[in-house]
Image (cartoon, coloured by chain):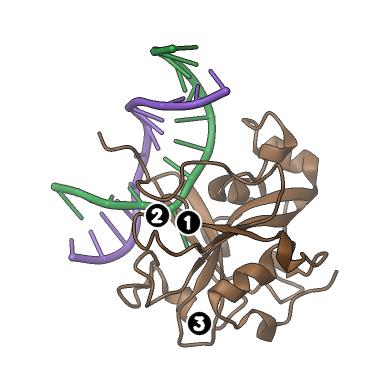
Chain colours: A brown, B purple, C green
Amino acid sequence: MRLFKREELAVDPVDLAHVLLGAVIETTGPEGTVAARLVEVEAYRGQDDPASHCYRGQTPRNEVMWGPAGHLYVYFVYGMHFCANIVGREEGEAGAVLLRAAEVVEGVDLARARRKAARRDDELAQGPARLTSALRIGPEHNGADLVNPDSPVRLFTGDEVPAADVRAGPRVGVAAAMDVPWRFWVDSPAVSVYRRGGRARPRK
DNA sequence: TTTACGATGGGCT
DNA sequence: GCCCATCGTAAAC
């Protein structure tokens, strides 16, 4: 296992999604270190993608996604959760991959303490907001450089995932662009199995 | 087991 | 003012 190189991440988000499956993201803070192997991701292509936060151009919130690849884009959602993306493409071009689920491979006890509601270890990072909770990724990590060994959040290559083992389907909770299968996962009990693309919430 | 819904707040039109 | 790249709990079957 080694740190990724930035140029390996400066690719189209759909390709980056395949690169990231099996990769290991690791966070270190005052409490200790937690590492997790990514098993489910979603590509957001940027300006061309109606579901992307960058679809309507650059804003203060999404500016990290327009910068160089290999940085973390963290955003606040539903009034109480955070989600993390890995930025791809070249500087000046928006695009990122949402981290949806992972298997905790290091610091399991710390992750359990942070995720009291999880009844099985498979649930520790089973979902995008659970993942940030287990790894304690927050707004202070927005823009963090994942290829810097001194960064609080780092990204390592894991065991390579054979292309034949990658499954694809519609993105979750996304009403726009439902026709593109830009959610990718590998067979794992930690993959989130929530409602498929369509409405984020049932209409009242 | 499966489904329903409330909590909660920032971003953008 | 409406829309969310969600989760945990409770209720229904």
The residue lying toward the viewer, choosing from A81 and A128, is A128
Residue A99 in the image, given as x and y percentages of width and height: 59, 58
Tags 2 and 1 touching, CB below 8 Å: yes
On the image, numbered disc 1 is attached to which residue? A171
- Choose mark 3 or mark 2, whichever is in front: 2
Q: Secondary structure at mark 3?
A: loop
Mark pair 3, 2: CA separation: 24 Å
The residue lying toward the viewer, choosing from A98 and A195, is A195
Mark pair 3, 1: CA separation: 24 Å
Is the C terminus of chain A in the top left, top right, bottom left or bottom right quadrant? top left
Sequence order check, earlier mark of 3 and 1: 3
- Residue shown at the point (46%, 80%) measured from the top left: A66
How many neighbours does mark 2 have within 10 angstroms: few (below 14), some (14-19), or many (20 or more)? some
On the image, numbered disc 2 is attached to which residue? A174
A138 vs B4: above or below: below
On the image, numbered disc 3 is attached to which residue? A67
Residue A189 in the image, given as x and y percentages of width and height: 71, 42
Q: Amino acid at mark 2?
A: Val
How many neighbours does mark 3 have within 10 angstroms: few (below 14), some (14-19), or many (20 or more)? some
Is the N terminus of chain A in the top left, top right, bottom left or bottom right quadrant? bottom right
Chain of the residue under label 2: A
